[in-house]
Amino acid sequence: MRFSFLILFYLTTAIVLIISLMGLPFKYKNFRFFVIFFTNNMKWVLRIFNIRIKVINPDLANLKGCLFASKHQSMFETIYFNQLFYNPAYILKKELLSIPLFGTYLKKLGMIAIDRSQGIQSLRYVNEQTAEYVEYRPVIIFPEGTRTTYGEEPDLKPGIFSMYKSLNKPVVPIALNTGLYWPKNNKIKSGEILIEFKEPIQPGLSKQEFLNQLKKAINSLNH
């Protein structure tokens, strides 16, 4: 099943990305058609392999003036969030912008790239960009810093507290179980993907209080 999934997903994804090149000259309002096309292709492939999707508390995705902090276990959420949110900005590794074709789309969508080699300067840049974006578009960060396996609960990266303190805005945790059905090794299995928006964590908490609350919230579907 893994081999069949990989062939079908990457073949159809390549076709969709090539077709979507036509949308690059357009502003986001019109380019979003191609973004949704890309997401629907993934959902269609998943349905063939009997993987369903359920979102809990989806109305929280429409909140303004806050930061969204999500668990990250699969390629799924990096694609699906583009449909779940309107014009989201991901905080991601600068290296991803160099991937042929895919990086072109990331630049088009105005993602916030962090250069880890620049240390505090890069963090300052990300905080400034996030402070600007968060007022009119959803900003999404994966506070563990990388994809994890289902059941794994690594410590959160210290940069998430820096952003929380600097922005002085609520943080909305997002829990999920995508690694159970579409893990890093692409050994998919049938079942129901769950994505749950948790109640916002309000500003003003101490570092440990904030990190404890956020870690508990994003891992609530991780066992």
Image (cartoon, helix red, strand yellow):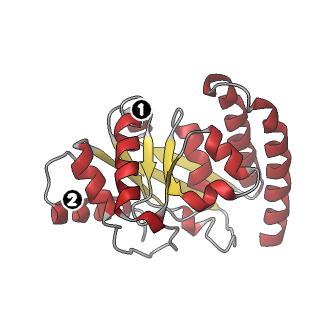
How many badges with numbers are in the image?
Answer: 2
Q: Position of residue 132 (x, y in %)?
A: 37, 35
Element class at badge 1: helix
**Label 2 belongs to which residue?**
210
**Which quadrant: the N terminus?**
bottom right
- Indicate whether 211 appears above or below 106: below
Q: What is the quadrant of residue 39 in the picture?
A: top right
Q: Which residue is mark 1?
A: 62
Comparing 198 with 72, the one in front is: 72
Residue at 58% across, 57% down: 192
Q: Is residue 199 visible?
A: no
Residue 213: x %, y % from top left = 24, 60
Residue ID at (71%, 58%) = 99
Instruction: Indicate left or right for 196 with 213 as reference.
Output: right
The residue nearer to you, when weighing 93 against 85, is 93
User: Residue 200 or 107: which is nearer the viewer?
Assistant: 107
Q: Which-is-in-front pick, marks 1 and 2?
A: 2
Point out residue 38 in the picture as x, y percentages from the top left corner.
72, 42
Q: Is residue 103 left or right of residue 62?
A: right
Residue 184, quarter of picture? bottom right
Decide if residue 118 is in sight here. yes
